[in-house]
Amino acid sequence: MPEYEYRTLTFERGTSRGDVRQALTDEAEYGHWELARTRLYLGGMRRVWLRRRIIRMRRESPGGLL
């Protein structure tokens, strides 16, 4: 089962959709984050949860065999 790390971004009420979209695009493209959840609150604040998979490298034994 894959493990994920999470990151939360918060956007204030006055932030335009284009700015939010650009920020999320940058995170996806350069940080390899994907959208996990979006929540829009009554006051207009938007909170976005991003996730990316944790890749663990298997360590080789001294003999070269696993």
Image: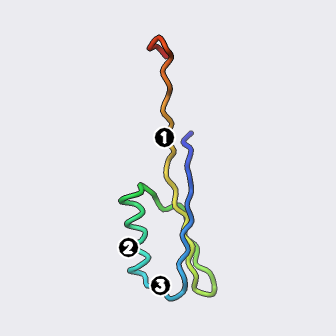
Q: Report how far apart the C-alphas of labels 1 and 3 lie in the structure.
A: 33 Å
> For the point 40% across and 79% down, which residue is it?
19
Q: Mark 1 points at which residue?
A: 55
Q: Name the residue under label 2.
A: 22
The quadrant in which the N terminus is found is top right
Image side of residue 37 versus residue 30, left or right: right
Residue contact between numbered discs 1 and 3, judged by CB atoms under 8 Å: no
> For the point 43% across and 85% down, which residue is it?
16
Image side of residue 2 versus residue 33, left or right: right
Label 1 SS: loop
Q: Name which quarter of the figure residue 27 lies in.
A: bottom left
Q: How crowded is mark 1: few (under 14 residues within 10 Å), some or many (20 or more)?
A: few
Residue contact between numbered discs 3 and 2, judged by CB atoms under 8 Å: no
Q: What residue type is labelled 3?
A: Thr
Residue contact between numbered discs 1 and 2, judged by CB atoms under 8 Å: no
Q: Position of residue 45 (x, y in %)?
A: 58, 82
Q: Position of residue 6 (x, y in %)?
A: 56, 56
Which sits in the foreground, 41 or 12? 12
Q: Earlier in the sequence, mark 1 or mark 2?
A: 2
Q: Which of marks 1 and 3 is nearer the N terminus?
A: 3
Q: Name which quarter of the figure residue 22 lies in.
A: bottom left
Label 2 SS: helix
Q: Name the residue under label 3.
A: 15
Image position of 16 with respect to 10: above or below? below
Q: Which amino acid does label 2 sit on?
A: Gln
Q: Report how far apart the C-alphas of labels 1 and 2 lie in the structure.
A: 26 Å
Q: Position of residue 13 (x, y in %)?
A: 54, 86
Q: Where is residue 57 in the image (x, y as percent from the top left)?
A: 48, 33
Q: Which residue reaches farthest right?
A: 42
> For the point 40% across and 74% down, which residue is it?
21
